[in-house]
Amino acid sequence: MSKITLSITLSLLLGATAVLANSDNMAESLMKLRSQVEQLDSSISEEKESHKATMQSLLRQKDDLESVVAREDLKIKQLEAELAKVKQEITDGSKNSDGLKPLLLSALDLLEANIQSSLPFKTQERVADITQIKEQILNDLITPQKGLALTWNAYSDAIRMTKENGLFKQTIKIGNEEKLAEIARIGTMMMYFKTPDNKVGYASKDTKGWYYKEALSTEEKEQILSLFDAFKKQIRTGYFNLPNAITMGENK
């Protein structure tokens, strides 16, 4: 009888020990699960904040782009309106060839000012072309009618540029050094560059005027290089991720 009692007692003790061990294991497992849940909650919160920040950044870029597009549309309308005005003034003054000269010179002055303030794409060459036309008109080297045709073409080129995307080459100044660079121009809104030593960046503007800003982050470099690659493949339209090269009065 005592043996049976002892056996039962040992069984109960072993069972209790097993239960306690299982309880400890369960408690430890629950603690681990609770820790994992807390980590997941923290990760989800961080992901939500990151997503929120990304969306806010994208919305700001969208607003900036819409603002630039609106400004470019306004610029096109102003050029077209100025061209129509010049055309009307020239029509009114064409009865007198001498009266045509000041109208043409005034129109060319307005166009030159527009070139000086807009995207720095071949600015010196374009201004030189305008200056040459003005000198020819002033010195009677061409007839007023020829001057009219040249002025008309100059305005047409300026309007065409606002709608044109493409690759070009021009000399740019980065810091104190001038370099011949490839240029990817998007209308007259944005202009990116790539130098022979593989520096990339974009044209920007502050209160002092235009300058060329080098892209330093890997992400921006890859985005700009992808744009050049697409343009070389004749892909001129579509969706591109690009550094924000919109000129909003940024300081150096």
Image: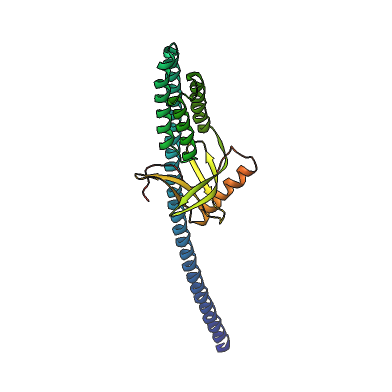
| Up/down of 89 relative to 41, above or below | above
Q: How is the image coloured?
A: rainbow
Spot the residue most to the left. Answer: 207
For residue 241, say whether it is visible: no
Observer-nearest residue: 207 or 95? 95
Is the N terminus in the top left, top right, bottom left or bottom right quadrant? bottom right
Observer-nearest residue: 195 or 141? 141
Residue placed at 39% from the left, 25% from the top?
Answer: 106
Residue placed at 65% from the left, 43% from the top?
Answer: 233
Spot the residue most to the right. Answer: 233
| Up/down of 127 relative to 108, above or below | below
Say which quarter of the image contains residue 104: top left
Spot the residue most to the bottom. Answer: 2
Residue 194 point in image, percent of width and height: 54, 50
Residue 110 point in image, percent of width and height: 40, 28
Residue 111 point in image, percent of width and height: 43, 29
Residue 239 point in image, percent of width and height: 56, 40
Observer-nearest residue: 114 or 131? 131
For residue 127, say whether it is visible: yes
How many badges with numbers are in the image? 0
Q: Is residue 231 left or right of residue 208?
A: right
Observer-nearest residue: 184 or 85? 85
| Up/down of 126 relative to 222, above or below | above
